[in-house]
Amino acid sequence: MNVRELENLLARTGRPRVLIVGDLILDAYVSGDVARISPEAPIPILTAKRKEERLGGAGNVAANLVAMNGEVDIVGVLGDDGHGRALRQLMEDQGIETGGCAIDATRPTILKTRMMSGAHQMLRVDWEDSSPVGGAAHQAMLAMLPDRVKRAKSVVLSDYGKGVLTKDVLATVIHAARSARIPVLVDPKGDDYKRYHGATLVTPNRKEAEQALGRKLSKIDDMPKAADDLMAMAGLDAAVITLGADGIFYKDKRGTSGHVPAQARAVFDVTGAGDTVVAQLGFYLADGLSLGAAVELANQAAAITVGRLGTHAVSRAELAAHLAESFPHGGKVVVGNEVDALLAQWRKDGKRIVFTNGCFDVLHIGHANYLRFAKSKGDVLIVGVNDDDSVRRLKGPTRPVNPIGDRMEMLAALEMVDAVTSFSEDTPAKIIERVTPHVLVKGEDWADKGVVGREWVESHGGTVHLAPLVPGRSTTSILERAKQGGGAPSC
């Protein structure tokens, strides 16, 4: 899919509810500088300067979903300790429901502490009990899972091998989800994938897939058979294998497959990249997207994550901006809530916003001069474009010559234009009220007709400017000359 299609899919996604079941981990980062070696042993001394705590494991999957504006429910186990309370508070601060977090006083909350010097990880210290969860905490999870599965649109099983995903928990979740026709995605651990039997798909990385299959997967050509074997092993509908610098490979039981290349960018830290991928896939499949589209968007999000230090939850706005960077002209085209978000950011940045509108059916020198004039009146220029139906109502059944998508792309390619959006009404009154620009610009031919939106803009402290026109240059005259087979107009 091209970037524009991905942008449109992202813009149309809703707020699906995703249930995450798995190992809850508190990630701590102790950062500082190393300037000397210890006199006690041949080891570096880290002069600590700051400590930060983040959600890890299943909590990081949840954080990624919250950042995408998804509704999140989570089931896992916490110890009855300070780290458990800190982890619960981190989740609640991000709007993650924690009623599904059972307390087990017999085991510690999992804590992973990373010692960091700059961008380099020097040491990791883990506090954990990875034995299978049992007793009252296990029974509490089994009791709450069926109802929570039914409320979700997809389920993510985040397996870090720390004891939460017991045989009974897996069977309960997968059975309830299959009964409700809800996809179950597994971020797997270990070499026994039969324990995930009946899930929808697994998302191993290359090393994990090699471990499960007992063979090396050195080439992309090895992946189709690997995916088939993983699906057969666990009775899955699909397999998604993340390949680091080689991107992501996916295949489903119908034979549909694809290889999405990795996005070229600097890699600082792969921590949490798998969490981002499975969270993204769970989000999009819950919202009804195809597996191929979900993988392509997840691949874009993973490119952002590996460019950050430590675990990083990719937000919907961040992903949209990343896609826009990949296609700069198209990134100027804004639709739906993107318009309001862009305007809010411009106002926050203190930008003087200019608005103008028109059909812009066949771009010509008059349009270029007009738009250059408009941009000169402020810091940023947003252009409203009549959609195809409104152009037909205004100009007749033979117009527009170019469809709305083409017209917006052409405007977005102009250096003086900062954003382009469309509107469907015969007049720009509604879009002007939505934008409420500091400056409204129209052509000087509107001097006697009355500029639509003038009263609104001026009542909100803005100004209206009339742009000079280039004599003899208009879309109508160009089309008429073309119809008659005439040449270029005289200068």
Image (cartoon, rainbow, N blue to C red):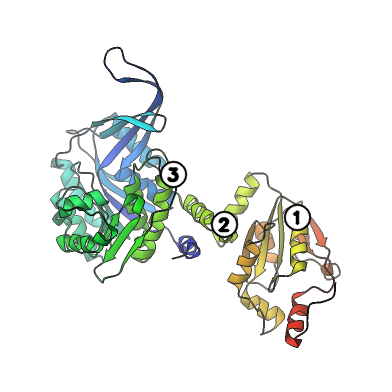
- Asked if residue 152 can be seen in this view, the reply is no
Quarter of the figure that contains the N terminus: bottom left
Q: Disc 2 on helix, strand or loop?
A: loop
> In the image, 315: left or right of 173?
right
User: Please, what secondary structure does the residue beneath circle 3 have?
Assistant: loop
Check disc 2 and give the amino acid type: Pro
Q: Seen in the image, is 179 located left or right of residue 360? A: left
Question: Nearest the camera: 194 or 15?
Answer: 194
Q: Which numbered disc, 1 or 3, marks the residue that appears first in the sequence?
A: 3
CB-based contact (under 8 Å), mark 1 and mark 3: no
Q: Earlier in the sequence, mark 3 or mark 2?
A: 3
Disc 1 crowd rating (10 Å Cα; few below 14, some 14-19, many 20+) is many
In the image, taking residue 246 as reference, residue 213 lies left or right, namely left
In front: mark 3 or mark 2?
3
Q: Quadrant of residue 80?
A: top left
Q: Are marks 1 and 2 in contact (CB under 8 Å)?
A: no
Percent x, y for residue 271? 34, 41
Name the residue that disc number 3 marks. Answer: 266
Mark 1: which secondary structure?
strand
What is the spatial separation of the Cα atoms under label 1 and label 3, in whole angstroms? 41 Å
Say which residue appears at 77% left-offset and 60% top-offset: 441
> Mark 1 belongs to which amino acid?
Val
Residue picked out by circle 2 = 328
Please, what is the three-letter code of the amino acid marked with disc 3?
Ala
Distance from the alpha carbon under mark 3 to that under mark 2: 20 Å
- Determine which residue is flagged by label 1: 439
Regarding residue 112, the answer to whether it shows in the image is: yes
